[in-house]
Image (cartoon, grey):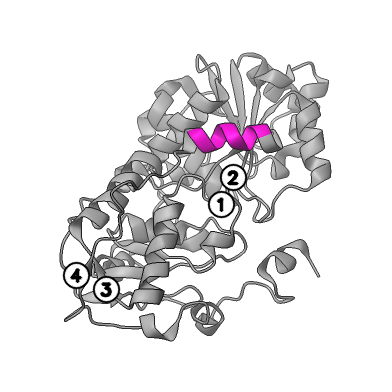
Amino acid sequence: MKVGHLLRGTPHPAPVGRPDYYTRELHSSLFLRSSSGLPTRNFLTPDHHEPGPGELAKACYAHYGVYPLNFSFPTVRVAPVTSGPRENFLSTTYPGVPHSFDDWGQYLEEYRSSFFALSTKKGGWDTFRHLEILFSGAIPLMPSLGNASRFALAHYPKKLLSGILDSLMTEGPAVPDEATQSFVSQWAKDNLTTRAMARYLVDVSGMNTERVVFLDSSLPKRTDYLSAFSFIGLTEVLGKHVCAAFEPAFLFDDFHGDTNRLYGKGFGYTRVIPSGLRSTESLDRSAPLTDLVALAQSASTLVVGNYDANRDLVGALLESGISPDKFVCILGSDTPPDRALLRGIRRSGMTFFVREFPA
């Protein structure tokens, strides 16, 4: 049995086209369509407090020697949402349900008309679905979130989200009042946009932002959400102070290719970076290592968007004499790093951000 299967408690992979696999996690009493006639409930206690990402980052580093990082929502895609009445109690868009939408706006409309939406753990706890729900003004219901690591989904209001689901289960269905809706919406804007996540990445790592080179040789050909969102956010925060060693063309707003061929049909993350921020120094993927070494030598910081896919390049750059304290590496795997990898990270002299943690 693979590690990911053990973490999900099943020998089977997280399936596509099997909504029953995910809907079984939510109590049948909550599968209500209409919100009509339901009571309104304030899910916030007067003394409610959520630990912020910065607070959790310090605790996580003290425990593991790494910092937590999550997917984020492109800031330019954030649309105004209002608190108040919605037609539906629970969205009928569930994990595992295949959809035929070719337009992201149509896909999100179901969330915009609903107070809640089911969003479960799949390969790992972090998923873009959570963000699509939140930035549509709905609230994700995440069964078993209370059993997750303290550092999983570190940028989310997990205490409130767990409390909302517990309340719905024990006290019966109700719709959130405007105070609850506003709290969740504001938390998302403050902590879960690409700009907010990149600001956190910069501040927590203490990186020198004079000249940042973003390194992910796999991203131009294969979508990796955490890498893509991190690069998007860094361009928002640092502008032309960040250069992609290998350009992911589909992230720029002048891209003319077919985004439907990309992971998730390219919904949400494609064509979001102004073309004016494109670097003229990006390399072809077939460029010799000497060119990459020269680019790395000119950098104040090297952000490795997908460490797993670029270990060989990182190793080659270290061997060429690039100082390890220049590297800020991102581990975006669905499975948490094991003890051997964490020991290696502590000895490496590099700064690491990690997406998933053991329960």
Q: Which residue is mark 2?
A: 219
Residue at 41% of width from left, 50% of height from top?
157
Query: Are dots 3 and 1 in contact, CB under 8 Å?
Result: no
**Label 1: which secondary element:** loop
| Mark in front: 2 vs 3 | 3
Q: Residue at x 70, y 38 (%)?
A: 64
Q: What residue is disc 4 on?
A: 86
**Residue visible at 51% across and 31% down?**
201
Q: CA gap, disc 4 to disc 2?
A: 38 Å
**Looking at the image, do the residues carrying marks 2 and 1 touch, with CB atoms under 8 Å apart?**
yes
Residue range (magenta): 55-62
Q: Nearer the viewer, mark 3 or mark 1?
A: 3
Q: CA distance from mark 2 to mark 1?
A: 6 Å
The amino acid type of the residue labelled 2 equals Leu
Name the residue carrying label 1: 223
User: Tag 1 or tag 4, which sits nearer the N-term?
Assistant: 4
First along the sequence among labels 4 and 2: 4
Mark 4 vs 3, N-terminal side? 4
State the separation of the CA atoms marked 4 and 1: 34 Å
Disc 4 crowd rating (10 Å Cα; few below 14, some 14-19, many 20+) is some
On screen, 17 above or below 116? below
N-terminal of the pair, mark 2 or mark 3, is: 3
Residue 158 is at least partly visible in this image = yes
